[in-house]
Image: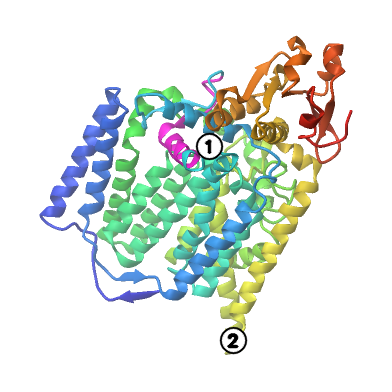
Amino acid sequence: MSSSEGGGSPHVAAPAGRLLVAAGLAFSVVTAALVALGNVGTLAFLAWLASLAAGLAAFRRTGPEHRLTGRDWFVLAFLLALAGFFRLYRIGEIPSGPWVDELAAAANAVDLAGRAPFAPFATTPMFEAGPDWVHTPNLYLYYCYAVLWLSGFSPLGVKLISVLPGIATPPLLYMLGRRFLSRESALLAAGLLAVSHWQVTVGRWGWDEVLVTALTVAAFAALFAGVQDERPSSFFLAGVVTGLAQYAYAAARLSALAAMAFLALHALQARRRRGLVQLGVFAAGIVQAVVPIAVYWIAHPTTFAVREREISILPKLLAGDLRPLLENLRAYGLMLLVRGDANPRQNLPGLPMLDLVAGILFVVGLVAAVAAWRRAEWQLTLLWLSIGLLGGLLSHPESAPNSYRVGIVAPACMLLAGMGWQAALGIARGARPGALAGSSAYLAAGLVALSGVLTFANYFVARPASRECWLAVKEGAYCEVLRQRAERAMDAGVQVFLDSSLNWVTTRLQFDTLIARRRTPAGFRWVEAGALEPTTLRFAVLFVEPLRYPELPAALQALPARAVANPFGEEILVAISADRALVALVESATR
């Protein structure tokens, strides 16, 4: 990156800057008042946008300006392509089906957008039948709806909710890494993140954690730019991005804590008033971004941190029981390098979350970071890693280690790997000047390629071959098989009947919300299969569970039928029709 000279300090342009600061604060107060009075709609949203715009415009851009070079743009394009391949390749086949959480978020987004009025600063329970399970901020659901709408409410759209931020995260990490690493080391760190089996697995689910990870990296990139360039606008922007992350997943609160701890340590170490001002500007950005949902949570405390209260071990710790914490320390201490997440939905059970390449470089980088902890980049990365792990360490150990709950630390691990590569090169060149001078870049690229090959083998070869992983989404895998067969029939203009035995949560969310948005209302119907007359199936296909098939009337059993099996030969559905040609729309052996 090139830079232009200049100096600067965290101040606002006067007098226009002071007026903009005052305007931003005034709009924030108006936003908070409107939400407190129950107006969580358009007026509050406009006031909130005005407060953010005024705050971003208030600070004069001073200090050296770093610009991306042509090589940097090429690297960013490469990282987008690499991350895109690993997150989109065979996305319709792997994972085996949708998880109920991602379908619930999509269904809630569609339902919310169809209701009036616009209400971005409230929350929606994940399931109406269990309102005290998880409450999702509506602003995140509107983001989900935008992605779904752009994708035509397709199954791919559900995945794109996380795939898009997952693709964006490696380039963002590169931009952060270039602040204190060589281009080669920053590319290595970002490349390892792009092909990380940890991030690939989580990033192919429609989960909110992936968006929080992307926003965390973006916020820390702006934050570190502010520390280096002393640009107040960078601190405010970092605060706003950190605040926006609070509308998604709870781990965003740990991102905010890590950033605040870093700025506090930086101010303490520098012993300058300017450091406290930087911390204040960052905090102002968070407050202005989060104030409407914070006011809503204060007014509706039962909607805040519901899930966190359920799984937290803090009550046990306060009661003097340290066993859950000790169990978690062991599980998460082994997670990265020895034994990873055992949940087949999130990992090949037990596979370390860092592969051999990333793991070795991570250890080297961790040692180097601890040895030189007084440097700002090491402080930020170490705080990011240690505070980010609290999401798992302070949760119930039953599912430990849970790679989803600590997903925000994956970029920090890869940064440490990049630091490890740079430190190893420094040692090699110190012992032998000029060592690897012409080949280090090729070696770094080779390491990323090797890591990518390992991920490809683990995710795209071993995972589909694992019955445990295929069934990890439980009824979601069956739901996906049913959706594919049902939509194949509907594409041919055939009426589809779904027996009530198939009315699982995932199936209901998939068909009644998403498929209903892109199909005609008459395309499918829920029925009691036993009540159907055989003549009804002349130009229609009926799907039932295998256990339900023997209970059907003899007249229905006499019709042509075909079993649908999973990849391991286990029957999961039966398709029935009076027309053999229609039955042939679904594959597998004839009953």
* Residues at discs 1 and 2 in contact (Cβ within 8 Å): no
Q: Residue at x 66, y 45 (%)?
A: 92
Q: Does 44 lie within the magenta span?
A: no
Q: Of marks 1 and 2, which one's residue comes earlier in the chain?
A: 1
1 or 2: mark nearer the eye? 1
Visual colour scheme: rainbow
Q: Is residue 141 magenta?
A: yes
| Residue under pointer 2 | 438
Residue 339 picture location, percent across and down? 73, 50
Judge whether residue 318 can be spotted in this image: no
- Which of the two residues, 590 or 148, is positioned nearer the viewer here? 590
Q: Is residue 244 visible?
A: yes
Disc 2 residue type (three-letter): Gly
Distance Cα–Cα, label 1 vs label 2: 50 Å
The residue carrying pointer 2 sits among few (fewer than 14), some (14 to 19) or many (20 or more) residues within 10 Å by Cα, namely few
Query: Quadrant where the N terminus lies?
Result: bottom left
**Residue 333: where, in percent of width, then height?**
66, 51
Q: Can you tell which quarter of the image residue 442 is in?
A: bottom right
**Which residue: 10% across, 54% down?**
15
Instruction: Give the residues drawn in magenta, as a range.
Output: 130-148
Would you identify the image quadrant in which residue 318 lies? top right
Q: Pinpoint residue 100: horizontal percent, then vertical percent.
A: 62, 31
**Which secondary structure lies at badge 1?**
loop
Q: How far from the left and from the top, in percent, is residue 219?
A: 41, 53
Residue beneath disc 1: 153
